Amino acid sequence: MSESIQLKQSIVVRARPDVLYRLALEPRRRAKWDKNFVSAAYEGGDGRLTNNALVRFKFRRQLLGLAFTAKYGQLQPPQRGGWESVRHVGPLEKLTQAWSFKPMPGGTEVTLSMNARVRYRWIRAPIERVLNNMLVSTLIELQRTVDAQGAQLMEDVGKELAEKQRAEQKAAKDAARAAKKRR
């Protein structure tokens, strides 16, 4: 008895849909920025992003290093595209990934959907966690790749804020100690 997993997340990225489309769906580009994959390459054929093109993906070791072949489909540049596994992927009967890119003021709304059919009911929960982490990290890495300066700025602002809070807490503790000594 197989169990289904359906995940979907959206983020807004400051880039044009056509740029994001190529980054997300072109295998060689995807392997460069997506930390979940060790490699991605076309299998045979002319090596172009077309419907029914076969691509060989290999996950990193933390994702069991699974290698699988996927077939591209539903490609409508630059609005959407995706792929589905040709055969089972480890404990999964089927794994599909679909992207959609919706232009909006200031960027593009990127939606990533993943669907999987788990071969064994007992492994559904851990696999769902792994796939959800993979989905979120893929969107974050895409954001970072396109808007490296913006992502770095957000990280720096976060660090500065944390340091400021630590300094304020230390000052408050010091003031409390000084007040206690005066009593």
Image (tube, helix red, strand yellow):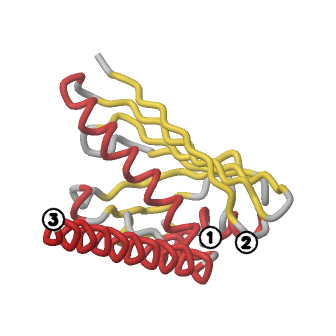
Which sits earlier in the primary sequence, circle 2 or circle 3?
Answer: 2
Q: Residue 106's image quarter?
A: bottom right
> Can you name the residue that lies furthest to the right here?
105
| Residue ID for mark 3 | 183
Which sits earlier in the primary sequence, circle 3 or circle 1?
Answer: 1
Q: Mark 2–mark 1 contact, CB under 8 Å?
A: yes
Local crowd size for mark 3, using a 10 Å CA cut-off: few (<14), some (14–19), many (≥20): few
| Label of residue 19 in the image | 2
Local crowd size for mark 1, using a 10 Å CA cut-off: few (<14), some (14–19), many (≥20): many
What residue sits 69% from the left and 49% below the top?
A: 100
Q: On screen, 150 above or below 173?
A: below
- The residue closer to the viewer here, 162 or 117, is 162
Residue 102: x percent and y percent? 78, 51
Q: CA distance from mark 3 to mark 1?
A: 65 Å
Q: Residue 46's image quarter?
A: bottom right
Res. 101 in view: yes
- The residue closer to the viewer here, 114 or 155, is 155
Label 3 sits on a secondary structure element that is: loop
Q: Residue 181's image quarter?
A: bottom left
State the quadrant of the N terminus. Answer: top left
| Residue ID for mark 1 | 23
The kind of residue on which mark 2 rests is Val
